[in-house]
Image (tube, rainbow, N blue to C red):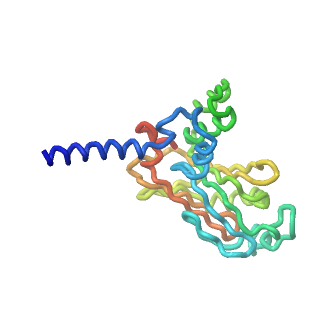
């Protein structure tokens, strides 16, 4: 009897653990996600991670995987010695940015949910946005201060310093990069990587690596098995 009870308890615990472990993107329709869940998807989920950077000649601070130093455009850290206000770094010392698989379906669902509101009807253009097939792995850095727009003049250098690195595979270099100003406060940088040799669960982890300016290097690992919904790897 004791063995049966122990066995039954073990089965119950496994079932309970599966319920507890279920995430909102697996449990709920995206239109019912709360504002907090939308924010979590964009900042702290298998598809999105936060990184703190420190500029103006100070040391880089690690949040997740981050190393580097002062920010320099065109070498020598010139931008770091810029004047106060405007796009200079004189008054800026720290920024928190998000590294996001911006076109992964769960992230697109979060963006649509943010536009239509909780329980809102998804318009035809939203449905089209959700159903489009991205020909690239597209990773964005969101929330960069406006001064980073200067990187638009250094596209080839940034591309050369960027890659996706699977655990045991060859690095995947980007084939394009885009810069977008988001209001007056931040810059979005998007990197497009080819899907010629698709990532699979066998790759286990993939690391995004880029260098912004002369010294700031961002490295962030993503665990592929966590980036599944209903058994599908969504990148």
Q: Residue lying at the far top in this picture: please name it.
A: 124
Q: Is residue 232 above or below residue 81?
A: above
Quadrant of the image containing the N terminus? top left
Residue 121 in percent (x, y) is at 65, 25
Q: Is residue 133 above or below residue 195?
A: above
Residue 132 in percent (x, y) is at 59, 32
Left or right: residue 9 versus residue 124 is left
Q: Is residue 15 above or below residue 63?
A: above
Residue 210 visible in image: yes
Left or right: residue 63 versus residue 167 is right
Left or right: residue 94 versus residue 197 is right
Q: Is residue 126 above or below residue 57?
A: above
| Residue 35: quadrant of the picture | top right
**Residue toward you, 195 or 122:** 122
Residue 14 in percent (x, y) is at 31, 45
Residue 175 visible in image: no
Residue 100 in percent (x, y) is at 60, 50
**Residue toward you, 81 or 23:** 23
Q: Residue at x 58, y 33 (%)?
A: 32
Q: Residue at x 41, y 52 (%)?
A: 203
Q: Residue lying at the far front in this picture: please name it.
A: 1
Q: How many marks?
A: 0
Q: Residue at x 68, y 32 (%)?
A: 116
Q: Residue at x 69, y 35 (%)?
A: 115
């Amino acid at each position: 009897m004791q063995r049966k009870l122990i066995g039954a308890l073990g089965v119950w615990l496994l079932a309970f653990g599966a319920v507890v472990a279920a995430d909102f993107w697996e449990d709920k329709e995206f239109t019912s996600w709360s504002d907090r869940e939308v924010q979590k998807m964009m900042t702290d989920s298998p598809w999105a991670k936060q990184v703190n950077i420190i500029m103006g000649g100070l040391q880089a601070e690690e949040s997740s995987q981050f190393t580097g130093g002062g920010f320099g455009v065109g070498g020598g850290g010139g931008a770091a010695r810029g004047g106060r206000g405007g796009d200079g770094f004189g008054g800026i010392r720290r920024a928190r940015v998000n590294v996001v698989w911006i076109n992964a379906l769960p992230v697109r669902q979060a963006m649509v949910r943010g536009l239509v509101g909780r329980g809102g009807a998804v318009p035809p253009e939203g449905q089209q946005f959700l159903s489009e097939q991205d020909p690239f792995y597209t990773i964005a850095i969101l929330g960069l201060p406006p001064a980073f727009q200067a990187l638009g003049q250094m596209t080839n250098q940034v591309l050369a310093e960027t890659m996706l690195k699977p655990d045991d595979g060859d690095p995947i270099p980007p084939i394009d990069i885009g810069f977008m100003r988001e209001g007056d406060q931040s810059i979005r940088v998007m990197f497009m990587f080819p899907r010629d040799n698709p990532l699979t669960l066998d790759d286990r982890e993939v690391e995004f690596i880029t260098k912004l300016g002369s010294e700031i290097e961002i490295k962030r690992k993503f665990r592929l098995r966590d980036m599944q919904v209903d058994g599908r790897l969504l990148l």
